[in-house]
Image (cartoon, rainbow, N blue to C red):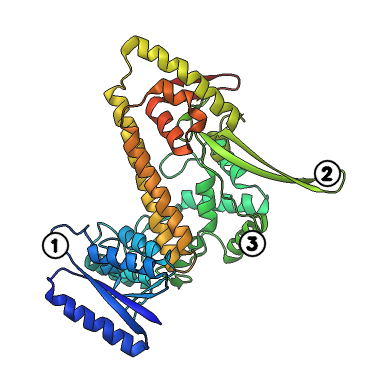
Amino acid sequence: MRALGYYRSINGPESLVELKEGFEDYCDRYVHQGMGTFGDVISGKPAEKPEYDRMLSYIRETESNYLIVVPDAGHLGSDLEAVARRLVELEATGSKVTCADDDMPDPLQNALSTLGMKGVSKTRSERIKESMRERALQGKGLGKPPFGYRNGVDGTLEIVPEEASVVELIYRLYTGDGLGLRLIAQHLNERDILTRRGGRWNMVTIRDILRNSTYMGTYTRFGLRLPKSHEAIIPPKTYRIAQDETRARRPVGRVINSEPFLLSGMAYCGYCNNKMMGVTRRQSWRRKDGRRAKGVYRYYQCQSRNNQSLCSYHTWRSAQLEGTVVAQLKYALQARRSSNGNGLSPQRREEVKGIWEARVKNAERRFLQAMKRTAQGELDLEVLREYLDNLDKVRTAAVDSAGPVDVEATINRWEALNFDEQQGFLLQHIAKIVVSDDSVEVLV
């Protein structure tokens, strides 16, 4: 196969000769036809990469597919995001990228191994992991023990009787009485049974307890599985029944990729002051003529009702609520402008800044998770590209949210704005949306 070599040097032009020889040796060993090498010397401006850009232009001009050989993933970029961007860019030309590292030729796997996570010392991380593996081999608890247990003096898990009885109740309600997650949370909350932190139960907490094999006495960590490492709260048979029940209740062959909701994080229930969450429901039915029909319904629902079985069933269709909010926002902003000018208060600016910082961090976290899954073969590079594109959109929106905005002009061309522009505008100008069954109040 025709191959191109690319490498970066931090030791000056002299080391490029050695890197070139390494590429030629690789081509000889694997019978590739070396078509050329490109080497950048990193100086005070690591962002400059003239030889990489020249290689990219060469690939596009020749309209050919090449095998791009790098010594390791670090030559594509100094962090995981930079490596992913170069990899997506190169493979979009039809070329393939490989590392000359025989033990780890896949560039994504190589990047995760050689570069590590941002802000984490790879050497220190490995030492910590090794120490944790040794504790795991002995069945000793690592970190916070699950509800129902505490870490004993010798490091092994010990039962907390009052919490263990709640765990037993949860499994009995699920496997014996057939209650779902929401109804179990409602059952516990109505009887004033509190979590370890003194809070109320929700569906996620119940789900995690039902999934945790620790409760049948099995310790699992770092790929290790140690049966009977500590005293069980739930018999293994009951635990397996719970897993079978979960699989039986889960919809089969249904993949949901819902669009985000415009008012996420801004709308609150007017009765319990908890957030309104976006919900997507898909239904199918058979018409009288025998043909099947499908429908997608999107609405906002009080989060307390769904997660903690509190409050009542307060819902608004998404299009109706979003349209009402935009219509009210125009008049609310006009009133604010006439009273205290068009600027945001310093407190509100900090709130908006914090919201966008959190959104950027979430987008970065999702990208890193996608990169790991791509390295494991669960996703392809085209999907990874979508995560990078989304990260770019969120970062751009975060910058734009801090800039000046012509409020009236923005609302007048509302339908022409994309989702990120609309949500960025709302986050910048809305402090809170209070939603009741028959009214909506927009606070700016």
The answer to which of 137 and 416 lies nearer the viewer is 416
CB within 8 Å, label 3 to label 1: no
Q: Position of residue 377 (x, y in %)?
A: 47, 69
From the top left corner, tell me how far across and down residue 68 is, in percent. 35, 74
Q: Left or right: 15 with respect to 368?
A: left
Q: Is residue 435 visible?
A: no
**Above-or-below relation of 43 to 305:** below
Q: Which mark is residue 230?
A: none
Residue type indicated by callout 1: Ser
Residue most extreme to the front: 61
Secondary structure beneath disc 2?
loop
What residue did someone put label 3 on?
Answer: 244
Judging by the rendered image, the residue that carries numbered circle 2 is 287
Q: Position of residue 22 (x, y in %)?
A: 24, 82
- Closer to the N terminus: mark 3 or mark 1? 1
Q: Label for residue 43?
A: 1
Q: Residue at x 41, y 30 (%)?
A: 425
Residue at x 35% of width, y 79% of height: 3
